[in-house]
Amino acid sequence: MSRDRVNLGFLAAAHFLDHLFMLIFATVAALRLAHEWDMSYAALIPYATPGFVAFGVGAIVAGWIGDKWSRPGMITIFFIGIGVSSILTALADTPFEIALWLLVVGIFAAIYHPVGIAMVIQGRRKTGIPIAVNGVFGNLGVAAAALLTGYLIDTGGWRSAFVLPGVVSVVLGIAYGVLVWARQGSGTAANDAAANDAAATGAGNPAVDAPSIARSTFVRVLCIIIFTTAIGGLVFQSTTFALPKIFDERLGDLAGSATAVGGYAFLVFAIAALAQLVVGYLVDRHSVRTVFAFVGGLQALFFALMYQLTGVAALVVSVAFMLVVFGQIPINDVLIGRITKSEWRSRVFALRYIVTFSVMASTLPVVAGIHAGWGFGALFVVMAVAGGGVLVAALMLPRAGAVVAQPAVA
């Protein structure tokens, strides 16, 4: 197997684990700790906030180190660090302790997106499908968080939900360090952006970089990326974090145990993950502006439909809105890949993800407040408005041009 494929395999596994670790607590809080610690769901949610703040703020530091030192080295640190911190989270006996260890989990989780996504697209002519395939694994991590956590809660208690993935991550980190990073050499010169591009190029991917574009176009596209990233973070966090609780409340007899709730959440997330493949294919062949606007419009429609639905209807519409929530994810990454140079791409990805995860962190208290005061119906109204904002922003992208209309070429 080529070094490029080995790298992509580990990067996919890292993306899976990154999202899984960040959402274990969502299911634990909704289905077990609220009862064991005699706290309401709304009262527990804020204890996850420090971890999501670190998830965002740490991205800019991780991106800078990845560009200046070693991207493979940072991924090795990610695997081992997040695994150990998850295991330690299982030792928590108070809300303060669990918040502290979730903060550490968030610090290590911040590494993946600015570093890993930059590695995925290095040296590739068409970036939509590679980003989408990697994104599918991230979304499967979201899905598995609900399913695996629900199962482990029922069979081994909530602490096992942190321990088992932690052990797997540490083992993968050791394997990555031995099989991948060691092959590339320990010197920074062998691991800088140019060397990483060369590795991808050697796998049959012609080295390409962003085309020259007008400064005004660059600023315009970057501002749209930042705005839709913020909206996307709000929507993604609200839906993925709250979905187990939404199903617990709205599916009635369909979801009678933690495993059942996790199973339905996994089903929805796993089906929705496929949307990234479709969107990745479309943005490699059609105008990003058109695809982006279509996705935003469908978000507004499906969230509006979900307002008071229960039972099977709620399950079906949940699949629909998660398809377009996940479908939005690769679009901004593709745009960044087309307008940035490789040597500072990790830092631009870091900017995108610090916006995403900072919004995600601030979203948790909002979700808690909306749920406590008005229920999830009000949350879906907010999400529908957010989808409309994505639609409007997408329509402001340039109508034509190499940057947003078609893949960049050498």
Image: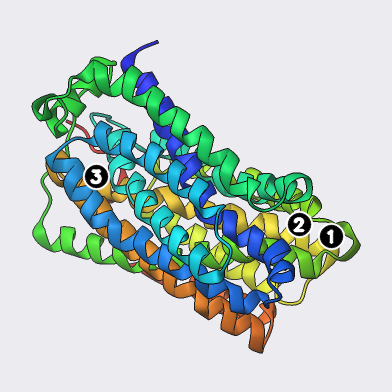
In the image, taking residue 315 as reference, residue 340 lies left or right, namely left
Q: Are marks 1 and 2 in contact (CB under 8 Å)?
A: yes
Q: Secondary structure at mark 3?
A: helix
Query: Residue 43 location in percent, x, y?
Result: 60, 79
What residue do we see at 39% from left, 37% from top? 80
In this view, the mark in front (3 or 1): 1
Q: 229 or 119: which is nearer to us?
A: 119
In the image, is residue 27 above or below residue 390?
Answer: above
Type of residue at label 3? Arg
Q: Report if residue 391 is visible in the image.
A: no
Query: Residue 37 location in percent, x, y?
Result: 68, 71
What residue do we see at 70% from left, 70% from top? 34
Q: According to the image, what is the colour scheme of the structure?
A: rainbow
- 3 or 2: tag closer to the N-terminus: 2
- Dot 2: within a 10 Å radius of its alpha carbon, few (fewer than 14), some, or many (20 or more) residues? some
Residue 108 got which mark? none
In the image, is residue 385 above or below residue 99?
Answer: below
Q: Which residue is mark 1?
A: 312
What residue do we see at 83% from left, 56% from top? 257
Q: 214 or 343: which is nearer to us?
A: 343
Type of residue at label 2? Val
Residue 316 got which mark? 2
Q: Report if residue 367 is visible in the image.
A: yes
Q: Which residue is mark 3?
A: 338
In the rendered image, the quadrant that contains the C terminus is top left
